[in-house]
Image (spheres, rainbow, N blue to C red):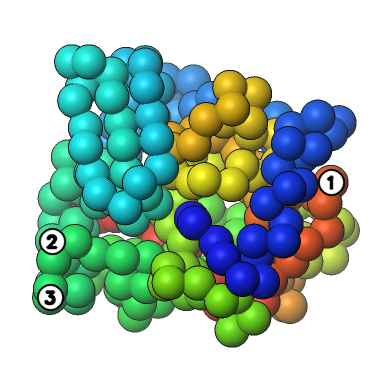
Amino acid sequence: MNIRGTLAAIAVLAAAVAGTAASPARAKSAPSARARQPVMEVIHRIEQRLRTTRYVHVTRVDERAGRYEFDCSGMAAWVLSRAAPSAHAAVMRRNGRGRPVARDYHDVIAAAPKDHPRGPWLRVARMADVRPGDIIAWRKPATVVSQNTGHVAFVVAPPQRLDRAGHRYLVRIADATSIPHGDDTRAERKRTGFGYGTMLLYLDEPHGEPTGFGWFGSPKRIDFRTHVAIGRAVF
């Protein structure tokens, strides 16, 4: 997510975030094999083969060489086209012009049914039901000045509730970004592109959908308000 304007001022905090105390969601990579499903299998494959990675607005992947270059929506398209082709096709149809962007993922997930799947997507409306392989997507917050349309990431570990009322959850994710999240694998290696990080999701209602996010997780309270859609590809 190449953030300008309002968000550009916080880029300098990325290095400091990597040095903060470990959060409850500190796992450095994907969960164990027992938790995997098709989406997680592809993400785990990237992790195992990765040699070089970079955040760019085109997709260049050479698995044999371990080269993964893409942005957040490019990574989502690459992973889903291999793990969940029908879900990928649905987002492609939404875009109608070429490679989907983050806004398309949000809109497809937000429009999906939340009780029983009637297509390739299921909306996950309760944080307690979120599991590895699910996708988080949001449209760009109104306060952010950017050419990007939002952000999209993959959940890689069950969310961890931070307060008794259920208004804040830490979520371990895999994505492609130029600005590291909290407890981020990219910050350690001083690189952009594919990696794992921890972010914070906010809920106004304990059993509702997220209404905001904290890019850096809990150590740095820099938060943004926007509807956050969480979805699951149906296989």
Residue 216 image offset from top left, x and y in percent: 71, 50
Q: Pointer 2: residues within 10 angstroms few (<14), some, or many (20+)?
A: some
SS of the residue under disc 3: loop
Q: Are marks 1 and 2 in contact (CB under 8 Å)?
A: no
Q: Nearer the viewer, residue 169 or 47?
A: 47
SS of the residue under disc 1: loop
- The residue carrying mark 1 is 219
Measured in 3D between alpha carbons, the distance from the residue under mark 2 to the one under mark 3, in whole angstroms, is 10 Å
- Nearer-N-terminus badge (1/2): 2
SS of the residue under disc 2: helix
* Amino acid at pointer 3: Gly
Q: Residue at x 52, y 30 (%)?
A: 191
Q: Are marks 2 and 3 in contact (CB under 8 Å)?
A: no
Q: Residue at x 50, y 72 (%)?
A: 146
- Nearer-N-terminus badge (2/3): 2
- The residue carrying mark 2 is 89
Vertical side of 105 occupied by 160: above or below? above
* Amino acid at pointer 2: Ala
Q: Pointer 1: residues within 10 angstroms few (<14), some, or many (20+)?
A: some
Q: Residue at x 80, y 38 (%)?
A: 16
Q: Nearer the viewer, residue 115 or 232?
A: 232
Measured in 3D between alpha carbons, the distance from the residue under mark 3 to the one under mark 1, in whole angstroms, is 40 Å
User: Could one spot residue 123 in this view of the protein?
Assistant: no
* Amino acid at pointer 1: Pro
Residue 27 image offset from top left, x and y in percent: 64, 26
Measured in 3D between alpha carbons, the distance from the residue under mark 1 to the one under mark 2, in whole angstroms, is 38 Å
Residue 122 image offset from top left, x and y in percent: 34, 65
Q: Nearer the viewer, residue 52 or 161?
A: 52
- The residue carrying mark 3 is 96
Residue 229 image offset from top left, x and y in percent: 48, 69
Nearer to us of marks 1 and 2 is: 1
